[in-house]
């Protein structure tokens, strides 16, 4: 049954190891009680060998240019565990580091390594395959888990995180055997032929300027190339114009896809502590105009979540001409500008129309610079201009296994969310130090030691304001299931209409872009934070699909295990495009479970889809191999629906011989309309009856409706209700 004209499903990734920590650790964080910055540091000598015998006296740490005293210092090797951030050794008066007991993080021993292959041509695929397989020949401890992904127009997973080298080798072969750009070589060959047909530059002019000069000399009929054929030169220039426009378009497309894809890969890695590395095999990409902000956000997010990039330029030794495209674009921009000045009338060429954009993009066409910045800004390094990556990849594997972990007191006077630059300097001669560029000065939020990421600061301030801001519409709610039954006892649902968000087009012909960020706090009856959920979600669509996007919803459904009791749900959402913020608070109950008849909350069904491999078996909305997507904003247009479906779970009393019976009673604006009932089937092996009830609504007049669901078994009766609106 079709409920709405379009539903936008945004998947929320879960931990590859089946856990969803309540407090996502970042690379450097400020905790309640002990304000300490934690930092991973890799140290090598002038010969490139790792240094493992340092003491705190060998390093100096500067925070925003001010030297800070190292509070704790530890070498992490192989399968050892890392410290949690508030486990700080005390410094005696003599300056030595005391050997005080340290609290270890049980998940801190895990090392995550993600291999991402990005748009590789035939030669680059061969180089990347050899390099990745060489990496897998290194000896890694059992606590190193690797995953394999491919980044083209979107990010695709080929191998979940595993330490099975056989599976990883198979995934690498797969990732480097497919063709992203089969026709690049043919296109380059044709472009070279067209350049030859236009003719060589005699005064350093660009190809575009040569063709323009021919056109001017012949009154627009075309000049003569080396073959003496003016028509051929004109057609050659037409082909070159096509390729130039395609190159500019590809720069924007591949740059956007790469940045958003890498953001997706980075943004979910907060869910495990410890050192996390991404090996990015790429031929490079430019940062298109309008994407400077997301690019900075990508690097900031990587630093926040302790993710280090190692960029591998898979073009190998063929990168000597990497600046040729940039030079060519700049020449074409200059020629178009000169032509604009001297051309009083006539047709405007594509180069003239795009002169300014071409000049701007020409400075971003060297994709290797982008790869270098990505790696160096996150504590890694660039591997480039070689066909033999073995030595450099051995250093990468050493970085993954061996590093120093230190903490220090930043002595922050004001938690304003500002960026603090970190510099780690070695006192010994010849030390090469890799460390992250800094952290954000953020306060610990009230209750439960909940940590804040930079985007959360204004959201938390909004939750503490009175009255709560309500600058756009969204809904959130907590629903309950049977605490003694299978699966989770409850679920938190957030529903944001995309029509509430601001979607903007950064430049003509570009996709419309926007996004949202959210924070959800679940507090118990004592006002303690028992769960915290958060996220940053980018939203984008081409112009042809933006109307459908605006008609869709962002739906977030997070199953929770909560003990019986009364809970307060505090939800705040920010619109990235307008910086508007809305917040709401609501109460929900998780009832105590027992052997008697029980019933879950009732939710309106928005859609039903087949379960995915990542769907947890304990998801309370998983039913017979399908997943129910609920809605908590049940307002519908009569023209869009003919019927509504409702999802509920009944937990029969096993001691009762009588089967439970379900009754539904409809009312509109408080006036009873009618009811119906039917006997329910048998309970499953888990002792529950999952049920979807569908009611026709196409003949109902507009208004506000309430449906009461009442289940009776013997002398026992339980009831729940749900409301919806027909416009």
Image (spheres, rainbow, N blue to C red):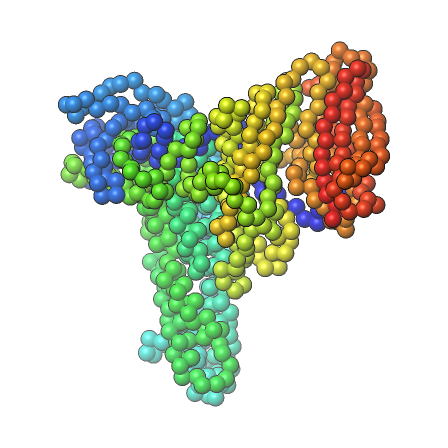
Q: Position of residue 668 (x, y in %)?
A: 78, 39
Vertical order, 521 against 195 (above or below): above
Q: Which residue is painted at 43% across and 67% down in the image?
A: 357
Q: Position of residue 64 (x, y in %)?
A: 25, 43
Position of 554 compared to 672: left or right? left
Q: Which residue is painted at 40% across and 71% down in the image?
A: 333
Q: Nearer the viewer, residue 502 or 196?
A: 502
Q: Which residue is painted at 77% across and 37% down in the image?
A: 670
Q: Nearer the viewer, residue 136 or 721?
A: 721
Position of 458 compared to 76: left or right? right
For the view shown, which residue lies furthest in the top direction?
655
- Could one spot residue 543 in this view of the protein? yes
Vertical order, 370 against 54 (above or below): below
Quarter where residue 654 is shown: top right
Q: Nearer the viewer, residue 76 or 405?
A: 405
Q: Which residue is painted at 77% across and 17% down in the image?
A: 716
């Amino acid at each position: 049954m079709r409920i709405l004209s379009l539903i936008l499903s945004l998947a929320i990734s879960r931990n590859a190891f089946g856990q969803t920590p309540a407090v996502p650790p970042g690379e450097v964080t400020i905790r309640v009680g002990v304000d300490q910055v934690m930092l991973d540091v890799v140290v090598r000598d002038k010969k490139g060998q790792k240094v493992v015998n340092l003491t705190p006296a060998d390093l100096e740490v500067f925070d925003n240019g001010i030297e800070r005293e190292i509070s704790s210092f530890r070498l992490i090797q192989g399968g050892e565990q890392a410290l949690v951030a508030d486990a700080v050794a005390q410094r005696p008066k003599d300056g030595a580091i005391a050997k005080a007991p340290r609290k270890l993080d049980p998940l801190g021993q895990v090392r995550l390594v993600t291999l991402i292959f990005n748009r590789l041509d035939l030669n680059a695929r061969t180089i990347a395959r050899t390099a990745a397989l060489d990496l897998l020949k290194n000896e890694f401890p059992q606590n190193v888990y690797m995953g394999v992904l491919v980044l083209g127009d979107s990010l695709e997973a080929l191998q979940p995180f595993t330490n099975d080298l056989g599976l990883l080798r198979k995934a690498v072969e797969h990732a480097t055997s497919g063709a992203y750009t089969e026709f690049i070589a043919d296109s380059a060959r044709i472009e070279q032929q067209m350049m030859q047909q236009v003719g060589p530059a005699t005064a350093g002019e660009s190809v575009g300027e040569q063709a323009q000069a021919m056109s001017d000399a012949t009154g627009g009929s075309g000049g003569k190339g080396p073959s003496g054929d003016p028509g051929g030169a004109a057609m050659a220039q037409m082909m070159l114009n096509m390729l130039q426009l395609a190159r500019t378009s590809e720069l924007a497309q591949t740059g956007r896809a790469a940045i958003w894809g890498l953001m997706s890969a980075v943004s979910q890695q907060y869910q495990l502590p410890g050192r996390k590395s991404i090996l990015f095999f790429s031929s490079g990409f430019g940062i298109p105009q309008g994407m400077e902000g997301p690019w900075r956000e990508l690097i900031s997010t990587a630093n926040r979540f302790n993710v280090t990039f190692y960029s591998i330029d898979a073009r190998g030794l063929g990168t000597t001409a990497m600046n040729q495209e940039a030079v060519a674009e700049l020449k074409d921009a200059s020629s178009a500008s000169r032509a604009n000045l001297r051309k009083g009338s006539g047709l405007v060429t594509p180069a003239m129309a795009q002169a300014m954009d071409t000049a701007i993009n020409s400075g971003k066409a060297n994709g290797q610079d982008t790869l270098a910045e990505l790696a160096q800004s996150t504590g890694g390094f660039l591997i480039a201009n070689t066909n033999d990556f073995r030595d450099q990849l051995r250093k990468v594997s050493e970085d993954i296994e061996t590093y120093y972990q230190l903490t220090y007191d930043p002595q922050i006077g004001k938690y304003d969310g500002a960026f603090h630059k970190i510099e780690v300097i070695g006192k010994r001669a010849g030390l090469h130090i890799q460390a992250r560029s800094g952290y954000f000065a953020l306060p610990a939020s009230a209750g439960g030691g909940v940590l804040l990421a930079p985007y959360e600061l204004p959201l938390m301030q909004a939750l503490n304001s009175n009255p709560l801001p309500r600058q756009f519409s969204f809904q959130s709610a907590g629903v309950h299931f049977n605490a003694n039954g299978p699966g989770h006892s409850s679920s938190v649902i957030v529903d944001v209409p995309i029509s509430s968000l601001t979607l903007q087009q950064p430049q003509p012909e570009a996709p419309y872009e926007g996004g949202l960020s959210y924070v959800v706090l679940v507090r118990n009856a004592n006002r303690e934070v028992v769960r915290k959920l958060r996220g940053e979600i980018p939203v984008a669509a081409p112009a042809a699909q933006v109307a459908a996007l605006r008609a869709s919803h962002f739906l977030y459904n997070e199953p929770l295990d909560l003990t019986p009791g009364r809970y307060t749900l505090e939800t705040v959402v920010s619109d990235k495009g307008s910086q508007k913020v809305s917040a709401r608070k609501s109460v929900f109950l998780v009832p105590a479970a027992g052997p008697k008849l029980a019933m879950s909350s009732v939710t309106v069904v928005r859609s039903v889809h087949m379960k995915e491999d990542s769907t947890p078996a304990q998801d309370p909305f998983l039913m017979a191999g399908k997943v129910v997507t609920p809605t908590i904003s049940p307002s519908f247009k009569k023209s869009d629906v003919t019927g509504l479906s409702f999802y509920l779970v009944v937990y029969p009393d096993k001691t009762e011989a009588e089967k439970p019976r379900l009754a539904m009673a409809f009312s509109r604006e408080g006036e009873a309309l009618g009811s119906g009932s039917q006997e329910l089937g048998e309970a499953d092996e888990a002792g529950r009856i999952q049920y979807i009830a569908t009611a026709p609504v196409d003949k109902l007049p507009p208004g506000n409706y309430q449906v009461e669901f009442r289940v009776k078994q013997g002398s026992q009766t339980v009831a729940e209700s749900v409301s919806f609106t027909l416009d």
